[in-house]
Amino acid sequence: MIASTATLRNYRQAPRKVRLIADLVRGKSAARALALLSMLPKRGAEPMAKLIKSAVSNAKVEAAELYIQKIEVNGGVVFKRQMPRARGRASLIKKKTSHITLSLSKKVK
């Protein structure tokens, strides 16, 4: 039974970097995940914590009773920019974004 979900769309960081944070909190209780993210020195930790808090408030249940059932990081829109190179050429720079989907569930006692 899924208690609540929350999504963060078009987060301006590469999915590969955000997945490292998602793998760290997957399967943990919501309270424990928030404690881990508060001490994590990664840029994506703060938006991930905000997303978990949003899902907890959507559930209308205490954070101690919920755990992260599913967290999924997918690629979003890719912004394409050009950088000037030698001899009048240009090379492509891809600025990647992420879509994060989080599902919280109640602990079965």
Image (tube, helix red, strand yellow):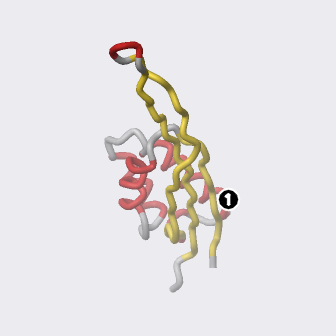
Split into 4 quadrants, where in the image is the N terminus?
bottom right
Residue farthest along the front direction in this orientation = 87
Q: Position of residue 77 (x, y in %)?
A: 58, 42
Q: Which of the pair 58/103 is nearer the observer?
A: 103
Give residue 48's position: percent from left, percent from top: 49, 49
41 horizontally vs 92: left or right: left
Element under label 1? helix
Q: Specify few, some or many for label 1: CA neighbours under 10 Å numbering under 14, 14-19, or 20 or more.
A: some
x, y percent for residue 73: 50, 56
| Residue bearing the label numbered 1 | 58
Q: Is residue 95 above or below residue 69?
A: above
Residue beneath the point at 65% across and 65% down: 4
Query: With respect to residue 101, does 29 lie above or below?
Result: below
Residue drawn at x 51%, y 61% is 72
- The quarter of the picture where residue 93 lies is top left
- In this rendering, the answer to whether 26 lies above or below 93 is below
Q: Is residue 87 above or below residue 33?
A: above
Residue located at (43% from left, 22% from top)? 90
The kind of residue tagged 1 is: Asn
